[in-house]
Image (cartoon, grey):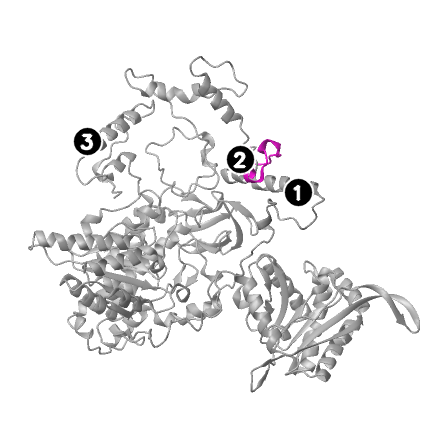
């Protein structure tokens, strides 16, 4: 019976850590070689790790949810003597690429993390110099071996031996030079910045790209007077017009908008709504234990309202197909999102089947994915109706352009306190403006008005959702 | 395949759908050669059936056996990577038919230039599979002597092996001018749909056509260049490209081991006889990740993967063997057992692998002994011997650890 420990390997070319997602075994379980023992998530992917040993799990050394460095022991397995005969002592040491191994391992070597095969991750040992034999005569090796120590002068600089003074001086200047990677050095030169003026925050005291950028930003803001109409870094006349190639998301957006704006006759209508009860409702949801950890905003209520109103007025949830109109009896609710890659409209599939809480979670996920720029093409296909939340930028309302393939879009304006007349008295209430654009080929004024009034009704009284 | 996969930020998909296949009248989708349907039924083909008619039951079972063992090897190597025993691994699952079918069409004198995924072809050349893992364990730049089995070292630089294969073929043709007693031989350049976009492939094909070189270009179109789908790489079927160079291009069902075998035999015989190059596009699918560092769920839909499941090359060969009464349960059970013991041996073999000494780097710099290399090797040995902790013979390559870094 031997106890074997499995250390977290680098499963993807140069990873240094991974999250433990789920253990598939528990202490006491019997495992065979290649049985899946744990699921981990790396920066690249979700990976199942197979057991390298056959035996009985004696302990799990890290917990689910932990982020673990490559090389950390994660599980120990007691291997039966019979099964152990073909397996080596522990996780086999990665083959040493050097011809000769570094001398005796330290006493703590058993606990020290082991270097992974890729050479990333924690290092088991500090680099140290192998001792040379005492100078064999007649070979140039002796002077060469000592050269490194001898040739590095202290930065303070004792007077250098004559003859090598120029070299020493140059070396000293090189050593005292501000550290920075070549691209940073080049950028500084291009911007006319002396690196010595920049505060360095790099791990080895080097000036990082970030340092340079914030220095430059500060310098620009100090220049002040130029205002916004200043092309960065150049004052030459011919560069006062910046040319930005149209491609990717920009081009896709442009094409979609032109197609929609000039093929679908847009009609836009607006309605002011007292959303005070929505604000209260949102406040209660936020405080509710049931919604712990879920971001709740008025957009959630609006999304629910749009789904509810579309169910009552199905023709707004449709596609114009030339000689027929395709009315969708399901709702893939699109949410326009500004992402690092540009404007995207991912949608929540089958939103009609989601409870309020499920919808909240879906909105959270969609927003998080979009923010990270990880929205997949599949997420954006098959939308049936879109909401654009211009209120998040403080805008009251607008006339949005319909997402191609759909016939309606709702713009959700900002919600702010305004004077409002209730029972003949002016009182401060939380007011918002809903805007909607509709494809008049499909949605007539009457229908669009009923739809918008339904959406407004829910914002005024979310309790109607219960009906 | 659905063009809607393309992330809008990377590819301008506008208009791609229309021009996907070029002008249809100029670029018809080629008929795909298939001898075995996905239900394992044999079909007749006027040109190619004759190339598999002489296969014995033993050889037919052999095709299945090879595919099975190579897939088992692939699974074990993937597990070894997950256990930290290999730096990375390049899975081949799904492409066994293309590799075994073509590999078994080679003669000993032919010479193969692989990419880094041709584990099945390596196996048909008689290379011990464990040797493939030396490089993936990070202890060798090569792993085997390519001259022993006429199977070149894995080439990680995309498509770089294609000009090598053409040049080697040109050389073999010249050798035969000098010594007509040499057997007729051809080279095979393996590459993928992704590598087909590299300039090297173009240059290789131009030279192959100009010199009528005895080379077969074997493109495994597995549909994905890591995350980029084939339809972005080429707006016409890949096999049609051969026409532009002036030699035949054939699309074959890459998951039909018999059809691949027949087409490759035909192409190799043609090349060996001096009739010039052929491009074979084996239409297949990478059922697994690009490498162990890749996560295909990030760029393709599981529905696409599932669509290829019943086209698994092993499945249809099993159906065929059973239907023809060429193999029974006992055969498949024995094979499973053989796979198991092979995996155990492989695991032991990998764990015991030792890196060759640095001195080994000097061995294959030149084809013949070279005074400068000799001098440098001596200097290296003196240097190694100069350490206080050095063993007397440190740095000397032993015959068993001799390594090839061609």
Q: Residue furthest bottom?
A: A323
Nearer to us of marks 2 and 3 is 2
Q: Is residue A391 left or right of residue A193?
A: right
Residue at the image position 30 percent from the left and 69 percent from the top: B240
Q: Secondary structure at mark 1?
A: helix
Vertical arrangement, residue B323 with respect to residue A144, above or below: below
Viewer-closest of A45 and A239: A239
Tag on residue A180? 2
Q: Secondary structure at mark 2?
A: loop
Point out the stretch of residues depicted in magenta: A188-204
Image quadrant holding the N terminus of chain B, namely bottom left
For label 3, the residue is B371
Q: The residue marked by circle 2 belongs to what chain?
A: A
Residue B100 spot, x, y in % from top left = 25, 62
Q: Secondary structure at mark 3?
A: helix
What is the spatial separation of the Cα atoms under label 3 and label 1, in whole angstroms?
A: 63 Å
What is the spatial separation of the Cα atoms under label 2 and label 1, in whole angstroms?
A: 22 Å
Q: Quadrant of residue A409?
A: bottom right
Q: Earlier in the sequence, mark 2 or mark 1?
A: 2
Label 3 Cα neighbours within 10 Å, binned few <14 / some 14-19 / many ≥20: few
Q: Are marks 3 and 1 on the same chain?
A: no
Q: Is residue A466 left or right of residue B152?
A: right
For label 1, the residue is A220
């Amino acid at each position: 019976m031997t106890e074997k420990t499995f250390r977290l390997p680098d499963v993807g070319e140069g990873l240094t850590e991974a999250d433990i997602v789920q253990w598939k075994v528990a202490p006491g379980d019997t495992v065979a070689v290649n049985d899946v023992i744990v699921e981990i998530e790396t920066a690249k992917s979700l990976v199942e790790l197979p057991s390298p040993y056959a035996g009985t799990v004696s302990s799990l050394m890290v917990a689910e949810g932990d982020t673990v460095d490559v090389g950390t022991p994660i599980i120990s397995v007691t291997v039966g003597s019979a099964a152990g005969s073909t397996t080596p002592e522990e996780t086999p040491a990665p083959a040493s690429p050097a011809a000769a191994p570094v001398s005796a391992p330290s006493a703590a070597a058993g606990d020290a993390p082991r270097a992974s095969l890729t050479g990333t991750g924690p290092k088991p040992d500090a680099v140290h110099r192998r001792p040379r034999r005492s100078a064999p005569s007649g070979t140039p090796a002796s002077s060469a071996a000592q050269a490194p120590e001898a040739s590095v002068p202290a930065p303070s600089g004792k007077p250098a031996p004559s003859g090598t003074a120029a070299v020493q001086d140059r070396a000293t200047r090189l050593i005292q030079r501000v550290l920075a990677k070549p691209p940073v050095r080049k950028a500084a030169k291009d911007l006319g910045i002396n690196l010595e003026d920049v505060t360095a925050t790099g791990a080895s005291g080097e000036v990082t790209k970030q340092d340079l950028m914030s220095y430059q930003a500060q310098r620009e803001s100090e220049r002040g007077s130029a205002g916004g109409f200043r092309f960065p870094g150049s004052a030459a006349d011919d560069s006062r017009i910046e040319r930005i190639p149209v491609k990717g998301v920009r081009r896709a957006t442009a094409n979609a908008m032109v197609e929609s704006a000039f093929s679908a006759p847009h009609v836009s209508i607006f309605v002011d709504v007292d959303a005070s009860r929505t604000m209260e409702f949102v406040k209660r949801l936020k405080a509710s234990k049931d919604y712990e950890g879920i971001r709740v905003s008025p957009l959630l209520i609006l999304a629910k309202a749009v789904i509810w109103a579309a169910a009552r007025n199905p023709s707004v949830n449709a596609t114009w197909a030339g000689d027929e109109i395709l009315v969708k009896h399901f709702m893939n609710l699109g949410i326009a999102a500004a992402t690092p890659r540009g404007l995207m409209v991912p949608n929540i599939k089958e939103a009609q089947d989601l409870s309020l809480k499920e919808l909240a979670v879906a909105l959270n996920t969609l927003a998080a994915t979009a923010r990270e720029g990880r929205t997949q093409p599949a997420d954006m296909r098959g939308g049936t109706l879109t909401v654009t939340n211009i209120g998040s930028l403080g805008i009251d309302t607008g006339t949005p352009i319909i997402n191609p393939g759909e016939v309606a879009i709702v713009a959700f304006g900002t919600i702010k306190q305004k004077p409002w007349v209730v029972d003949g008295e002016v009182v401060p209430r939380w007011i918002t403006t809903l805007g909607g654009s509709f494809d008049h080929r499909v949605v007539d004024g009457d229908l669009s008005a009923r739809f918008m009034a339904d959406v407004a009704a829910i914002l005024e009284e979310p309790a109607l959702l219960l009906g | 395949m659905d063009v809607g996969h393309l992330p809008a930020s990377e590819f301008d998909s506008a208009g791609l759908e229309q021009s996907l296949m070029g002008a249809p009248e100029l670029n018809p989708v080629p008929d795909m050669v298939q001898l075995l349907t996905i239900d394992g039924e044999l079909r007749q083909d006027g040109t190619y059936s004759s190339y598999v008619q002489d296969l014995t039951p033993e050889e037919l079972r052999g095709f299945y056996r090879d595919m099975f063992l190579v897939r088992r090897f692939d699974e074990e190597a993937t597990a070894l990577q997950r256990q930290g025993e290999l730096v990375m691994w390049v899975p081949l699952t799904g492409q066994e038919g293309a590799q075994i079918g073509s590999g078994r069409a080679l003669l000993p004198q032919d010479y193969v230039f692989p990419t880094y995924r041709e584990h099945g072809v390596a196996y048909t050349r008689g290379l011990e599979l464990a040797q493939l893992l030396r490089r993936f364990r990070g202890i060798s730049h090569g792993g085997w002597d390519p001259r022993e089995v006429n199977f070149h070292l894995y080439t990680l630089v995309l498509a770089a092996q294609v000009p090598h294969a053409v040049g080697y073929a040109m050389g073999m043709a010249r050798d035969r001018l000098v010594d007509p007693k040499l057997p007729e031989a051809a080279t095979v350049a393996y590459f993928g749909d992704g590598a087909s976009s590299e300039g090297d492939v173009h240059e290789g094909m131009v030279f192959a056509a100009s010199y009528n070189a005895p080379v077969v270009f074997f493109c495994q179109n597995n549909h994905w260049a890591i995350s980029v789908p084939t339809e972005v790489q080429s707006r016409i079927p890949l096999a049609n490209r051969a026409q532009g160079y002036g030699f035949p291009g054939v699309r074959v069902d890459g998951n039909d081991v018999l059809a691949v075998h027949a087409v490759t035999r035909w192409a190799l015989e043609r090349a060996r006889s001096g009739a010039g190059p052929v491009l074979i596009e084996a239409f297949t699918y990478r059922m697994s990740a690009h490498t162990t560092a890749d996560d295909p769920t990030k760029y393709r839909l599981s529905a696409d993967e599932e669509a290829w499941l019943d086209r698994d090359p092993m499945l249809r060969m099993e159906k065929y063997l059973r239907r023809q009464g060429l193999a029974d349960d006992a055969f498949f059970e024995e094979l499973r057992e053989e796979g198991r013991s092979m995996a155990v041996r492989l695991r032991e073999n990998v764990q015991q692998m030792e890196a060759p000494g640095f001195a080994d780097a000097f061995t294959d710099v030149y084809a013949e002994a070279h005074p400068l290399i000799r001098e440098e090797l001596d200097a290296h040995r003196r240097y190694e011997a100069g350490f206080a902790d050095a063993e007397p013979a440190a740095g000397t390559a032993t015959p068993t650890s001799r390594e090839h870094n061609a």
